[in-house]
Amino acid sequence: MPLREVRIADELAPGSNLIEDRVYEDCLIVGPAVFGLVDAWELTDCTFSGPWEEVFWVAPEKPIQGPIALRNVAFRRCTFAPHIGIIGPQEVIEQVGRDLLA
């Protein structure tokens, strides 16, 4: 079954950097985009276009601007196209790494 293409820019309300209360299943996630892991997010059986250390980044310990915030968002069996990055606190990124590399 072909993946449904989701362009992240089309998912944002005008002037917003927040995606919330969404479930994406069997989708091709297309950027470019950097996602900021806020809370209540899920990555299940997903694939990424690059090595883990190039896709997932540890956020600095100060506020940053620019990432698209994810709140209550699930990605299930999705493929992330090139030019997608994910940033979050160190403990969150480390847990994601353990989960994905297990």
Image: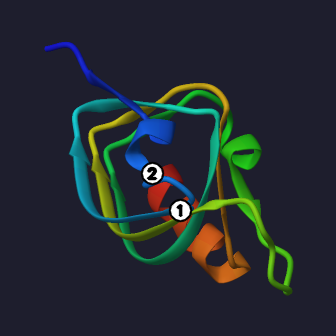
Measuring from the top left, give residue 67's x and y in whole percent. 67, 60
| Relative vertical location of residue 48 with respect to residue 63 in this rendering, above or below | above
Disc 2 crowd, CA 10 A, few/some/many (<14, 14-19, 20+): some
Asked which quadrant contains residue 83, the reply is: top right
Q: Residue furthest front?
A: 14
Question: Please, what is the three-letter code of the amino acid marked with disc 1?
Answer: Ser
**Residue 56 coordinates in the image, percent (x, y):** 68, 54
Label tally: 2
Residue at 78% from the left image edge and 72% from the top image edge = 59
Residue shown at 69%/78% (left/top)? 89
Along the line of sight, the residue nearer the viewer: 43 or 10:
10
Distance from the alpha carbon under mark 2 to that under mark 1: 6 Å
In the rendered image, the quadrant that contains the N terminus is: top left
Give percent across and percent down for residue 13. 43, 55
**Residue displayed at 42% across by 38% down:** 10
State the image coordinates of residue 54 (x, y, percent, origin top left): 76, 42
Q: Secondary structure at mark 2?
A: loop
Q: Which mark is residue 16?
A: 1
- Residue 77's place in the image compared with 38, above or below, is above
Q: Which mark, by number, is residue 12?
A: 2
